[in-house]
Image: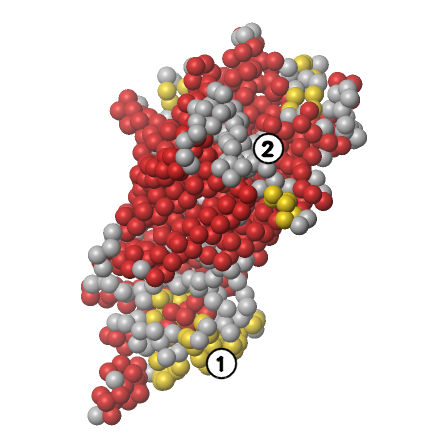
Amino acid sequence: MIYALIAFGYSLTFSTSRTINFSLGNLLMLGGVVGFSLAVDMASGQSLGRPFLVPLIGVLIAGTLAGSLVYKTAVQPSLRTKTDFTWVLATLAFGIILKNAVEQIWSTGDFRLPSPLGDSVVHLGSIGFYPQEVLIIIVSLLLMTAVELIRSKTIWGKAVQAVSEDPATASLMGINPQGVVHLAYILSAVIAAIGGLLIAPLTFVSASMGTAIGIKAYAAAIIGGLESGLGIVVGGLILGLGEVFTARYLSTGYKDTPGFVLLILIILVRPSGLFGRTKAKKV
Amino acid sequence: MNPKVFGVPTKIWKILFLALPMVLPVVVSNQYYVHGILGRILVYTILVASLDVVVGYIGDISIGHAALFAIGAYTTAILTADPRINQGATMLYLPQLPFFIALAAGTLLAAGAGLVLGFPSLRASGPYLAVSTIACGLIIQTIINEQETITNGTKGIHLTPLQLGGVSLDGNQFIWLVYPILVLVILAKNELGRSFWGRAFEAIKHSTLAAEASGISRTKYKISAFVLSSGLAGLAGGLFTQLDHYIAANTFTLEFSILALMALIFGGVRSSFGNFLGMAMVVILPDLFTAFKDYRLLVFGCLLLLTLFFLPNGVAGLFSLLVKKGIRRWLPSLTATPKLLNTSTLSAAELRSWLVPTGVASQAPLLSLRGVGKRFGGLQAVDDLTMDLRAGVIHGLMGPNGSGKSTTVNLISGVYEASAGSLIWNLGTKSIANWATFRRSQLGIARTFQNLQLFGELTVLENVLVGFHSSFRSSLIQVLLRTPAVRKQEQQFRMQALSLLQMFGLAELAEHSASSLAYGQARRLEIARALASRPRLLLLDEPAAGLTSGEIEEFNQIFLRIKDYGIGILLIEHHMDMLMKISDEITVLDFGKVIATGAPELIQKNPRVIAAYLGSEAGEL
């Protein structure tokens, strides 16, 4: 589900500006790290006893600032240059900078963040799960539904749609296309940062926690279709389940492979994804 | 023609300069700088050069080259490793083959992987392709880590230093192995870049449509670029095994792929010097400032951002700009480039006989369309179109906006496949309804585009040379070696291309970049490029759109001349006076259907045509 959430972040920027924020994985890491620093004393590993709201607010602020920064330093200048893959490298570079900075300023180690809902396994019949996992699913669904609703029902959503279709015309209608893209970047960064805070209690908090998730979420987005809300959720589920089953029945070393193989197959057969629409190109 | 510096021809200087690093192992005994730093840079430069073939030439992005490097390295290592120094290894198969055989195997295997990697590039580009190369890279890395019986897993493989004719290529002498190979790779890459292969890559990068219309198969050249690039990466990997005599899986990470890509962008694409410089930066910088080692990715990231935004051609681009200025100032003798205009060109009669070989003119139509239709979802763009296009005839095609004129051109040139009906090419009677665009171009159907599709980064002359693509008859090997035949052919085509430019009044602009042309000149260049493929049938999609009346008159003369050569023309125009003046026959479309066909005078009076243009009431009047 976390894949679906991050994949949703990718689709947000893609649907407004045809660009993908490749540093989203590292923004997720930023969320985890900031949340951890505000909740736990690093040296002792003891909880600081603050209410969960403090790290949450911290993460929201960090996500907003970082998203804005990516846009200003990497994306906006890229969109001005002529070559069409500048932004790929620029956002990648931003992610690397972020990761390296966190490694140096914060730490290269792995840390545990206790879940606010407790870290013991809850059993429901024969299925055991962590309460945090339920929280992830609920929050992810809520976030995605909320953003989708704003997108489809409000005048703001219409503006976003307009920018995605044709930035020049949208701008003639009094919409600021750059502002919309900027907003999309901030929103996707905030989503990623929240994702980092959510996933942190299940994994370890470290500077490298976002790399793999970032790539896999991107794979999920492509498998499902970058522009399809339903596709992204399905893509995330396919990838997550594939991972679990491979790890259980084949080998943990190969757990990432089926998702990637599927990704390549999808790109070969249906580049717009399982639920994407293909557009006829006009000559 | 042979400029000299200090009395010695520059060619000799170049060779001496190129050979300089070969002396290093003899004069320098310090292992650290020559072997540790320079050796590493040289090996990695081959990798960056391989990446350049994909990124610089074809304009695709790959973040999986570390995996191809790994394939070359592991293949070479496994085939050459000595079991005695790999005690306790889990590998089952160690044949201990000679190094160069293993190296060749590694190169070939990586090239094979490139074939697989290339296919997604046909369907996807940009972010989609980037992620598929990442995925390929991670899959290969997983396999290397997990298949312990083949690769020794995370423990890596130890190797013995290579001996060649009694000389050890260990330590500093590693340069003797890697440097000549690097020079060969770079020379071959440069040859490729300036040949018709390089132009084909550039054409595909800039406008796939126009490239295909010039007879360039996108599939062939994209896959070739990936295979070549991957083979080179494999070669670099194979050589890498001799650098430290040890390889381990944790070298070939995603991060390494990104680092190579950074080096490429930083140094500058399509520049061998840039490839070297970029990699040198990546290797040397952390070494110069040890304190900076931990921050290296941060610094590289910032450098990459700065390069992307401020130095689009990388450091090498900046450098060559400065050097060019310097040469112009201090060594003006070197700037005396051969003047293109002095080369002899074809006379009008020669141009004509070159364009259209005599003795093939016949009265049968070149191309017959029978009941051709094209449907886009619910829209019937072209319906039941029947039309004959003949040699030496200008066939006008008119109709209101959205009547299906451009769709017709796209159907004939193969951009769209017809959903109904047949297209018969009568020279040899072939049904071409489901042929790809580039094959139709090779058959003799050329076209221009309503919205110009020039290759902006190429010069005017090179744009025309792209049109010659199908005429080149040399193999890839010949091109890489730059055989005399290749040189002669290139010279000959350049002369013919220049003659074509003369016909269009563009010869003085031959060396200028196509993007610098004025609008009317760009329109003429597109027609020249289309003619360069020596077509039998020329499709002109609104060639006079946006031109002044003086220019239109020039165009009329050009079209009449082309017609006079015996080439068939299908002319789409909104300029009625042009269409009525030079067309021999006109077909009028409305809502995808033919509403009238005939001589211009008859079309002008046809009530249905008038109705279509002015509304039905006007027609009834």
- Distance Cα–Cα, label 1 vs label 2: 54 Å
Q: Which residue type does callout 2 highlight?
A: Phe
Residue at x 57%, y 54% (from the top left corner): A266
- Given the image, what chain letter belongs to the residue carrying mark 1? B
Residue that carries the numbered disc 2 in the rendered image: B69
Q: Nearer the viewer, residue A56 or B267?
A: A56
Q: Are marks 1 and 2 on the same chain?
A: yes
> Dot 2: few (<14), some (14–19), or many (≥20) neighbours within 10 Å?
many
Residue that carries the numbered disc 1 in the rendered image: B371
Residue at x 31%, y 27% (from the top left corner): B322
Residue at x 62%, y 35% (from the top left corner): B141
The percent position of residue B196, horizontal first and vertical second, equals 48, 46
Q: In the rendered view, tell whether residue A7 sits above or below residue B253.
A: below
Question: Is residue B142 visible in the rendered structure shown here?
Answer: yes
The percent position of residue B340, horizontal first and vertical second, equals 34, 42
- Given the image, what chain letter belongs to the residue carrying mark 2? B
Screen quadrant of the C terminus of chain A: bottom left
Q: Secondary structure at mark 1?
A: strand
Residue at x 29%, y 60% (from the top left corner): A155
Q: Secondary structure at mark 2?
A: helix
Q: Earlier in the sequence, mark 1 or mark 2?
A: 2
Q: Nearer the viewer, mark 1 or mark 2?
A: 2
Residue extending furthest bottom? B621
